[in-house]
Image (cartoon, rainbow, N blue to C red):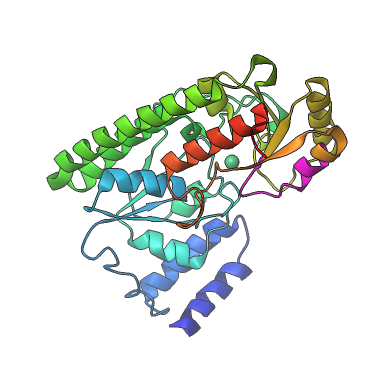
């Protein structure tokens, strides 16, 4: 089996005419159809008889698990800590996706690789952000494009949950009432965590209500909590943290005497450390957006992610952090 997997992977690497993801899909589907890779049996029935739902990243998987309860097997393509925007799917991801019963993606251009990933796969997929009030990016080359980080508002995640209930009920109609009940219970928790978040961040004095981060991933959270959002770069990509972007952040932090700045778990905090070095602001800590932590880390669930970020931001901006 490993020998054949290797052969598949080599096909993928060599054929890069248009896109790696598209070529990978073609190569893996070829491998599957010929059964030449001997991998067809691997992973089949990995849901233990339950339908398998595959999500693009860990935040969606954990939310989806709350809706699915024990009726569906939910897995994430990217692992905890992985960069989501520019992720390059592996042959193993594509094999897994080909055998899934449903794939969930965030949409709003979050997963730049997704369209090619599902092209050629005969698996239904649902876009969970459908119906949210989309915020646009106001800076950089992304100006006017949707900000994909809609899940940073728990209110938006309530809409994600509705979309999941709908998709799961279509997939497994016998358990539609269970998904509906699970969804309603989880939406109540989302409302509580949103209220908690707003209350906590409301304690930050007016003069300190600026949230400075590496990626512009906090627009929805900042909107809900009444914070001003400033960032070094708009969306995680290969080209980021140019000298101009860092200078702009430094100028803002100096002019507004911002007490603390932050960076996210999936990117290097080095550019923000430069801002700290040039301004005398403090590094307030690591925020989570594009991925949960491992189960023994600070943010194993979405609700914990919102609680953690609210706490770190509030402590940093009020000077309560040690
Ligand atoms: Zn992001």
Q: How many marks?
A: 0
* Residue in view at x 58 percent, y 24 percent: 136
Q: Is residue 266 magenta?
A: yes
- For the question of whether residue 192 can be seen, the reply is yes
Name which quarter of the figure residue 319 lies in. Answer: top right
* Residue in view at x 57 percent, y 57 percent: 88
* Residue in view at x 56 percent, y 18 percent: 226
Ligand 1 shows up in the quarter that is top right
* Residue in view at x 75 percent, y 45 percent: 239
Answer above or below: position of 116 versus 223.
below
Q: Is residue 281 left or right of residue 49?
A: right
Name which quarter of the figure residue 35 lies in. Answer: bottom left
Identify which residue, 187 or 43, lies in the foreground: 187
- Where residue 154 appears, as percent x and y from the top left, is 42, 30
Magenta stretch?
Answer: 263-275
- For the question of whether residue 211 can be seen, the reply is no
Answer above or below: position of 45 versus 17.
below
The N terminus: image quadrant: bottom left
Answer above or below: position of 49 versus 293.
below
Name which quarter of the figure residue 59 lies in. Answer: top left
- Where residue 313 appears, as percent x and y from the top left, is 61, 33
In the image, farthest residue toward the top: 206
Q: Is residue 69 left or right of residue 80?
A: left
- Where residue 211 appears, as percent x and y from the top left, is 65, 28
Q: Is residue 294 magenta?
A: no
- Where residue 12 appears, as percent x and y from the top left, is 56, 68
């Amino acid at each position: 089996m490993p020998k054949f997997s290797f052969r598949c992977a080599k096909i993928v690497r060599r054929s890069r005419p248009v896109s790696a993801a598209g070529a990978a899909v073609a190569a893996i589907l070829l491998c599957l159809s010929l059964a030449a890779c001997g991998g067809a049996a691997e992973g089949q029935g990995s849901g233990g008889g339950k339908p398998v739902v595959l999500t693009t990243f860990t935040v969606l998987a954990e939310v989806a698990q709350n809706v699915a309860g024990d009726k569906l097997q939910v897995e994430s393509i990217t692992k905890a800590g992985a960069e989501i925007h520019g992720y390059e799917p592996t042959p193993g991801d594509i094999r897994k996706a080909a055998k899934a019963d449903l794939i969930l993606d965030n949409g709003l251009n979050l997963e730049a690789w997704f369209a090619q990933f599902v092209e050629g796969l005969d698996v239904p997929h649902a876009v969970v952000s459908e119906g949210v009030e989309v915020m646009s990016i106001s800076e950089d080359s992304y100006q006017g494009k949707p900000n994909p980080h809609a899940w940073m508002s728990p209110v938006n995640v309530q809409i994600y949950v509705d979309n999941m209930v709908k998709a799961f009920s279509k997939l497994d109609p016998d358990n539609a009432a269970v998904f509906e009940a699970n969804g309603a219970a989880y939406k109540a928790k989302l409302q509580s965590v949103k209220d908690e978040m707003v209350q906590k961040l409301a304690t930050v004095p007016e003069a300190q209500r600026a949230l400075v981060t590496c990626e512009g991933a906090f627009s929805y959270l900042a909107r809900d909590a009444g914070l001003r959002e400033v960032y070094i770069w708009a969306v995680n990509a290969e080209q980021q943290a140019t000298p101009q972007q860092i200078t702009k952040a430094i100028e803002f932090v100096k002019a507004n005497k911002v007490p603390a700045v932050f960076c996210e778990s999936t990117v290097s905090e080095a550019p923000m450390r430069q801002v700290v070095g040039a301004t005398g602001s403090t590094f307030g800590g690591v925020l989570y957006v594009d991925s949960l932590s491992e189960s023994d880390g600070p943010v194993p669930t979405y609700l914990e992610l919102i609680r953690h970020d609210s706490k770190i931001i509030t402590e940093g901006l009020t000077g309560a952090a040690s």
